Image: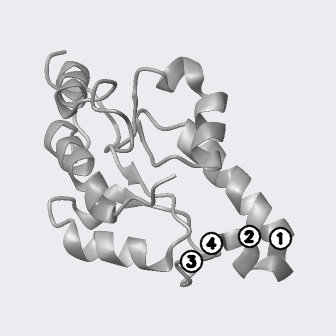
């Protein structure tokens, strides 16, 4: 498994910001946020400061979640004294991600659990930058977003 850089996800987030409404309108009574699930404490602060194409109100994540500042060790090892809490938070994150309209992920057991729980909805709406380019293209994502949010 390759550890993806945050930069790997920028094109996805940019297309999301470009094609989805950022404000409630007649057709939708809500905005379309980006839900960020991460166990790395630096990711959210980097996204908020570097992804200027997204308004702060569109970036969502769980608050008061155990997050690691150790880049080399899995969260369940870092917080071994709080395994129950770490496991409960992982299950909540899986459930939250499974409710998303689109799913962009790196290979992980959590991503597999999300896809397992929401395969019917996400099988054609999930994108992984790790994938073989023959299986994935940004053009497909852009076409899907246009169809869902622009062409209706």
Q: CA distance from mark 4 to mark 1?
A: 13 Å
| Precedes in sequence: disc 4 or disc 3 | 4
Identify which residue is drawn at 51% across, 58% down: 37
Q: Which residue is mark 2?
A: 76
* Mark 4 Cα shell of 10 Å, populated few (<14), some (14-19), many (≥20): some
Q: Quadrant of residue 67?
A: bottom right
Image spot of residue 104 (x, y percent): 40, 43
CB under 8 Å between discs 2 and 1: yes
- Work out whether residue 3 or residue 27 is closer to the camera in this orientation and state it: 3
Q: Nearer the viewer, mark 4 or mark 3?
A: 3
| Precedes in sequence: disc 2 or disc 1 | 2
Q: Secondary structure at mark 3?
A: loop
Q: CA distance from mark 3 to mark 2?
A: 12 Å
* Mark 3 Cα shell of 10 Å, populated few (<14), some (14-19), many (≥20): few
Image spot of residue 22 (x, y percent): 22, 47
Q: Quadrant of residue 73?
A: bottom right
Residue 38, disc: none
Q: Which residue is mark 3?
A: 72
Residue 65, disc: 4
Q: Nearer the viewer, mark 3 or mark 2?
A: 3
Residue 83, disc: 1
- Work out whether residue 82 or residue 48 is closer to the camera in this orientation and state it: 82
Image spot of residue 66 (x, y percent): 65, 75
Query: Which quadrant would the C terminus be assigned to in this image?
Result: top left
Q: CA distance from mark 4 to mark 2?
A: 13 Å
Q: CA distance from mark 4 to mark 3?
A: 19 Å
Q: Nearer the viewer, mark 2 or mark 1?
A: 2
62 left or right of 137? right
Identify which residue is drawn at 26% across, 26% down: 27
């Amino acid at each position: 498994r390759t550890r993806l850089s945050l930069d790997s996800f920028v094109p996805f987030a940019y297309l999301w910001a470009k094609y989805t409404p950022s404000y409630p309108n007649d057709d939708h009574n809500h905005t379309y946020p980006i839900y960020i699930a991460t166990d790395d404490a630096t990711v959210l602060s980097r996204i908020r400061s570097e992804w200027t194409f997204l308004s702060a109100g569109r970036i969502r994540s769980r608050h008061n979640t155990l997050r690691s500042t150790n880049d080399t060790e899995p969260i369940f090892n870092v917080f071994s004294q709080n395994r129950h809490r770490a496991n409960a938070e992982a299950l909540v994150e899986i459930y939250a991600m499974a409710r998303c309209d689109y799913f962009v992920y790196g290979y992980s057991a959590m991503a597999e659990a999300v896809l397992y729980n929401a395969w019917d909805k996400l099988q054609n709406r999930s994108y992984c930058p790790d994938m073989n380019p023959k299986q994935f293209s940004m053009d497909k994502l852009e076409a899907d977003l246009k169809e869902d949010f622009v062409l209706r």
